Image (tube, coloured by chain):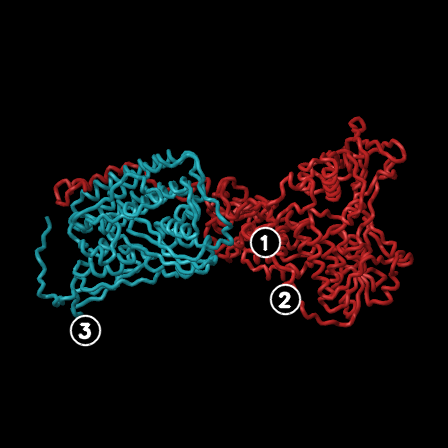
Chain colours: A cyan, B red
Amino acid sequence: MFDYGEKNRELFPETKSDGTVDIDLSSGKFTKLWHGPNHPGITGNMSLELTLLGDEIMESKTHVGYLHRGFEKLMERRRFINNFPLVCRVCVPEPDFNEYCYAAALEELAGIEVPEKAQWIRTLILEMARLQSYLMWIGGQAGSFGMGMVGQWTLWARDRVLQMFEELTGGRIYHIFILPGGVRNNLTEGFKGRMLETLADVNSILDDVERVLFNNAVFKKRAVGIAVIHPEWVDEYGITGPNARAAGIPKDVRKDNPYVKYGELDFEPVTGTDSDIYTRARVRFDDCRMTTGLIRQILDRIPEKGEFKAKMPSMLHWKIPAGETYKKAECTRGEYGYYIVTDGSGYPARVNVRGPSYTHAVTLAEKMLVNTNLADVAGTLVSLHTYPPEVER
Amino acid sequence: MGNSTKTSFKDVLYPFTVWKNILKEPVTIRHPEKREGSDRYRGFHTNDIDKCIGCGTCEEICQNAAIDMVPCEGVDTKPGDSGLRPRVDYGRCCWCALCVDVCTTNSLGMSNNFRWSVEGENRGEGNEANGTPDDYRFIIGAENKYWDKAEKGYKKPDGYDLTPPDRVQMDHLSVEERSDSFIEMMKGYSKEQAKKEADRCVECGICTATCPAHMGIPAYIRAIREDDLEEGLRILYETNPLPEVCGRICTHKCESVCSIGNKGDAVSIRWLKRYIADNVPAEKYKEILGTSDLAKNGKKVAVVGAGPSGLSAAHYLALMGYQVTVFEALPYAGGMMRYGIPEYRLPYDQIDKDINYIVSLGVEIKTNCKVGKEISLEELKRDYDAVFAGTGLHLGRSTRIENSDHKKVFQSIDLLRKITLREEIYVPEKIVVIGGGNVAMDITRSLARIQRQKYGQVDIVTTCLEPADGMLADDEEVDEAKEEGAIITPSYGPQSIEIIDEENVKGLHVAKCLHIFDEEGRFNPAFDMEDSQFYEADMIIESIGQASDISYIPQETQETLEFNPRRQIVADPDYQVKNEPWLFVGGDIAKGPDVITGISTGHLAAVGIDRYLRGDEK
């Protein structure tokens, strides 16, 4: 429909064999542009240092540090239990994956068996977290291409999910619900019914979004064929989650290394083929739909009776035998992991958080953005679904 | 993958479907917002000020240092209550509610209210804003905030605790194994059990404030957790030179105020103390405690009575360099610990372990040397620089009912002493004990054992004025006595003893006790004579309390002494007797009566003697 013809590449400096170009800023041909840290198209407080020729990006550098609080180091100085209100803050939109990975790692090191019911509630919490995170992401993806309306709908739907979080955990954003040994409380009375109502509302919003976002000439024009991740980059760059699945590689920790109760749930990872912005959006959208189905499966299978927490020693003096482990989970953005080393004391000796945004927002984004258009930067970054706090733990 | 990536005419039309929402109401909530938080919402804190004991565990667990324990108007420091209350700084709080989860009294909760603005409409009554961060810092539950009485909000869920509520039980002899034997009943904690029990302590220190000797309880429990028993022993000896004894039979006032006891079982402080003392070999004590080479200062102090207070005074005086001589009337040192408490509760070799260490510090104990008989108090005053008297309560009190002076009516304290001395005592087939305290249980259980050894069966009735839930004896003592075959009949008071002849009694008449104290709080029991019982017995034992025998103090000195209503000698805070500066008193004749109070008075008196002999001002 809209065709402006090919660019005249002769005006551009020659691209060398390693993919870089010689940039001579004094030539006056190039423009330096800071994209972020508070640009609405940036997913959080992060900035890109772009070098442009016309409106085409010649080079991109990711700058982080705006959110650095030294989470990993702080954890080394707190009791194991006192890290729970801290780990969730590593990733604001999805605190529960932090809580789960941290708890699961400690449980493995301390040899604690988590009761069946707690496992199911954990699965539920993790899928609810995925659902509300995707709903926020859809708004961002549509907004980055100028469709503010979609974000308003999905944030309403997300608020419905947060309401359920509030009912279950007492908190809307930071739930602090998955503690070592299990979870903090039982389901509330009538939770299942209200959650199903919420899911119906969410699905109805998703239908609307499907109609106006994925059947939209503007979105297709802006998203199809843009910012392609080649399948061979997946292993090279450590790409995981929907970014890898949109390239046709069915990487999903839930399926590959089932944790909590995923082994007992019926689902297949959603994959795509084209690996552009549109496909990644499609994969996430379908994954979001699948999540509502998974929550229904979980609600049907949570046992009525049973302990929600294992018998634990005193959390004030909890010491964990020396050891090390890595626990991972599939968050909306890919593989989320905690590597924890203990030394027999009451504090972790070392914690390393593996957030998927680290690879996606730094090395991958720097590679992908070269030769794309300035107007596509926001859409590309949102399509990578990156959250800066987990880059700079 | 539902739809095609090819653009079609449909893709131009579909976006216009957003217009279908044009007639819908907005989903946003207009200000002022009236939305209520959920039932579990973690909003502003609530605290039941009367239920809270100020243990400070919330302050301890708060990783943001948002909670400070501060004095609170209308709250007084008293046993079991620090008098402090938590103040939360909402500039630091992250609403994680770990403070609520760890609260030892369940007084702390969170309301479902989350709005507070010093300028807004929710400004609380009586809280004037002064424009500082203090506007957002409250002693929760004490500043009349609108959420103080909120019923909804986060509370600690049932079945979820950050500290284990149940005590680690100690292994003990079964009823069959113990009921005809004087072998020690409680077996002591294993290392694993002790560490598990020590794990439950929240280190609030309310126990330390309550213990008469102010022992460093959280510190020695921490030493157990860290498996450093030598450090534990050093902490014990700072305030208590009789840890083997106290680890077994202390009245454990600490446990009755233990903060964890508010929502589960109190930490077994007494048994943890025993674990340390049991597991450090006696021969290593001097090395660990650094007492191998004590300097002498050349001054001499006499101690009358080798009971807990006398031994405690002797121990601390010896550490300070005094030459101490203890005069003991009976054949062995230990006082009531040895002659009042049966062997199945406190084996003699354990008393000896504690005493031998005190002797090893250079303390001389002269047994079979009764002051007032073998040697007079004047001689002690003449030959020593100061005298400490801790002679205890060795005279039994009588009920003074009809025929209570009969030959077959005995005092429990005399019988217990004879059992310790392995003297032959009269134990018939039917016995009645009058009394409901721990001594009554001691004699009941001792005689039940002897009855079982002699006759193969137990027939002993113990009766007391107090109702079952108000008995002075420890609950476990009463329960174990029942297990061993004794019959306990609370709420019945003795009326008269029926006799057959000069040599034999027939039994005891008792009547239902209506109340023990009269309206003015004086001991004046009233009985319902309609509800009376008769207990047949060949022997009746009175165990209703003991009195002191201070006849060794010369009459003219006695006349200068002051006594309180409980016939205890009134002394200064360091137990120096008024008008007789050379004389210090301690133990049951001055305070108590119990072992740990005796130990603390002995310690304080030792410090007082040191001050007196140095000539320092008080």
Q: Are marks 1 and 3 in contact (CB under 8 Å)?
A: no
Residue designated by label 2: B287
Q: Are marks 1 and 2 in contact (CB under 8 Å)?
A: no
Relative to A84, is B164 on the left or the right? right
On the image, the x and y values in percent for residue B205 come to: 61, 54
Q: Quadrant of the C terminus of chain B?
A: bottom right
Q: Where, quadrant-wise, is the N terminus of chain B in this rendering?
A: top left
The spot of residue B220 in percent (x, y) is 60, 57
Q: Chain of mark 2?
A: B
Above or below, B18 against A2 in this view is above
Residue in the foreground of this view, choosing between B128 and B231: B231
Judged left or right of residue B291, residue B27 is left
Answer yes or no: are tags 1 and 3 on the same subunit. Answer: no
Verify CB contact (< 8 Å) between mark 2 and mark 3.
no
- Judge the density around disc 1: few (<14), some (14-19), many (≥20) Cα neighbours within 10 Å: many
Would you place residue B320 above or below residue A290 in this image?
Answer: below
Q: Residue furthest bottom?
A: A26
Could you tell me if residue A136 is visible in this image? no
Question: Residue at horizontal 60%, vertical 61%?
Answer: B230
Question: Nearer the viewer's eye, disc 1 or disc 3?
Answer: 1
Q: Amino acid at mark 3?
A: Ser
Reading the image, the residue beneath label 1 is B204
User: Closer to the observer: label 1 or label 2?
Assistant: 2
Tell me how far mark 1 sits from mark 2, CA to CA: 31 Å
Q: Position of residue B368 (x, y in %)?
A: 82, 57
The answer to which quarter of the image holds residue A296 is top left
